Image: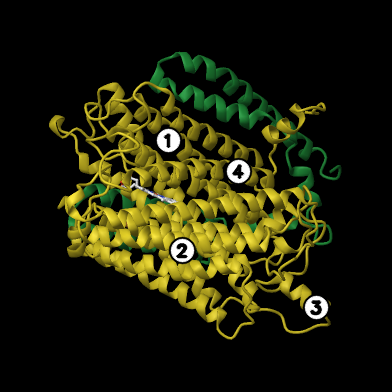
Chain colours: A green, B yellow
Amino acid sequence: MRRLLALVGVTSPTEARFFQVVAVLAAGGAIVYWFVSYETAGTALLGGFTLASGLIGLLLADAGTDWRASAASTRDPDRPLLDERGRLPSPTLAPFAVGVGASIAATSLVFGPAPLLVGALPLAWGALDWLHRSRAEMAALDDGEEGQ
Amino acid sequence: MSASAGLGAPLLVWLTTTDHKRIGILYGVAAFGFFLLGGLLALVMRLELSAPGLQVVDVQTYDQSFTMHGTIMMLLFGTPMVAAFANYFVPLQVGAADMVFPRLNALSFWLFLSGGLIVLSGYLVQGGPADVGWTGYAPLSELPYSTTTGTDLWIVGLALTGVASILGAINFVATIYTRRAPGLSMFRLPMFCWTILVTSLLILFAFPAVTTALALLLLDRRFGATFFVAAEGGDPILWQHLFWFFGHPEVYILALPFFGILSEVIPVFSRKPLFGYRLMVLATILIGVLSMGVWAHHMFTTGAISLPFFTLSSFLIAVPTGIKIFNWLATMIGGRLTFPTPMLFATGFIYLFTIGGITGVIVASAPLDFHFQDTYFVVAHLHNVLVGGSLMGIFAGLYFWFPKITGRALGERLGKAHFWLWTVGFIVTFLPQYQLGAEGMPRRYADYPAELGWTTLNGVSTIGSGLLGLGVLAFLVNVALTLRRPPDQPADPWGGNALEWWTSSPPPAHNFESLPPIRSNRPVYDARRAAEGGGRSGTAGPP
Ligand code: HEM
Ligand SMILES: [Cu+2]
């Protein structure tokens, strides 16, 4: 029952209700739009807007407030950011490599395959480095809750 | 990665950073660089228009200039400037050490910067940059009409910046939802964060439409598809739907965050809490959602859309916008007002944006729009909202938060000079354009006949754009002079309300050494009062 009330927005947390309210308003717009215009492109766009925001709202509502509590419980009120200090990544060239690599590769759509070859290298290196680092961080967090 | 000394070291710091503050600064500096370029193009166009005949550029160059100017200002300056403010201040205002996904945040920036440079790289290819208008209307953006490779680069570059914006929006929503400090409930969130939340929603649901449109257009141009080619069964109107489903919310992406900045600045310099906080939140959400349902007011004259629906929905937006303006005025009334530069820009915003809103209602009315469509009335209106609105908000924010970001306050004298040059420059540049539009001068033409009597007003408008240029110069000189001084600003130079004023200026790498108790939407104000010996707290929201 509590869950049902949350799903329809009665007892859902504000974070979820934000998306739920948006979805209801969007749905209203989509319906009115269809009946005054019978135009498909716009109705599809508004429908997509409704579905996407509705889905996010429902998922958040269904998750209840547990995720909120767990986000807060990791924080010691006296030393509010100590936990986060351990969580923050160290400087890394990976995002730069992925971003620039992907962009160079994308110009292949205009210039043919050559840029793809140039961009793929930093893209691949960056993506691997990124994965590698986040794995290592997760592992460190798992076996060192006290350590950080 | 340990950097060795020398010139490479500082460069490496910026290339490898995942700190939201540094990324915010990167966004701001890059966006402002693009702004200077877009401004230069504007001055070239204004020079060309100062007198009949072709003096400075030819017709093709003029087409490319307004295309690149519009594209740069909207997508390579305005939108990333929002990302700059949001990056720097959302984590600080919610009391977090960083964004939820710091590396993704860095990726957003590098995608944006590379995408922007790809758009500009059109200047290097034969045929020059895109010449299709910032709206890229099909069929004019299809191959037989726009042959330059610059248009393809425009498509690819913009798609990349679009992806960057979407990734950034996900990060902002997730940060506001999960990294708030203990006690900071949603209804104690600073208004700026609320506006970024709603702006992110718009980005999430509007940008995919334009990314799709760009992809389809590239397929048409490069791979023989016919999505927008009417002769082959495609539909050019579909481009307009997809583009404006993004394009109108985009206008609010360039307005809502600056509403947020005003809601931070005005209470501080009125020495009062923000009037009607919850109503402001509601108005923000309503503006956001309504702005997704008005796109086709740009398509009145296509005859393909429902006139009453879009006229009515466009009028409706005026209601929550009016609520905001009323609430800012109500905040100021009875306050102990002071007018340092940030407050000047904030009040200027209220005046000029209101005028822009009124002329907006005029063009949103279908019968009148049939008269004004594609005239300088529209050019005047859109610059009224963007130059008199968004830019005023950006400058208000920059003067307000510069001490926090750099530890140094921008000079007041140059700041005031900047404000007056910008305000007077705005009026002199764009008021004549309303008149020119009413007289029927069409937009997007490099030239006009001498005998129509448009020469004087165009000359006045060009002089005004010179004043705007001087205003920007005053700002740049101010920044350069200020940065040469040693940092001297305390944590809270203005007497601020939200958490960013709790920590040192500039903040340490991890933002906070401590946090005050949060019992209202003005925790820093509360703490100040408590330190002065107790007293009432600010407007308390329920937990
Ligand atoms: C600062 C002073 C500015 C001046 C003097 C200026 C001047 C101009 C001129 C001369 C045009 C071309 C008009 C035409 O031939 O149709 C134009 C178009 C445009 N401007 Fe500006 N502009 C300024 C700032 C801005 C800003 C800050 C923005 C956005 C944030 C902006 C967005 C646009 C857009 C979207 C267009 C339409 C481009 C198109 O037709 O495709 N402008 N501006
Ligand atoms: Cu619009």
Instruction: Tell me: residue A8, above or below residue B83.
Output: below
Determine whether, in the image, residue A43 is placed left or right of residue B543.
left
Question: Which chain hosts label 2?
Answer: B
CA–CA distance in space, label 2 to label 3: 43 Å
CA–CA distance in space, label 2 to label 4: 26 Å
Q: Report if the beta carbon of the residue with label 3 is closer than 8 angstroms to ligand 1.
A: no
Q: Report if the beta carbon of the residue with label 1 is closer than 8 angstroms to ligand 1.
A: no
Dot 2 or dot 4, earlier in sequence: 4
Q: Nearer the viewer, mark 2 or mark 3?
A: 2
Counting from the top left corner in percent of width and height, residue B213 is at: 33, 38
Residue at numbered disc 4: B29
In the picture, the quarter occupied by the C terminus of chain B is bottom right
Q: Quadrant of residue A76?
A: bottom right
Q: Report if the beta carbon of the residue with label 2 is closer than 8 angstroms to ligand 1.
A: no
Q: Are marks 3 and 4 on the same chain?
A: yes
Indicate the amino acid at tag 2. Answer: Val
Indicate the amino acid at tag 1. Answer: Ala
CA–CA distance in space, label 2 to label 1: 37 Å
Relative depth, front residue between B168 and B454: B454
Residue at numbered disc 3: B530
Dot 3 or dot 4, earlier in sequence: 4
Indicate the amino acid at tag 4. Answer: Val
Q: What kind of element bears circle 2?
A: helix
Counting from the top left corner in percent of width and height, residue B483 is at: 72, 49
Instruction: Tell me: residue A2, above or below residue B46.
Output: below
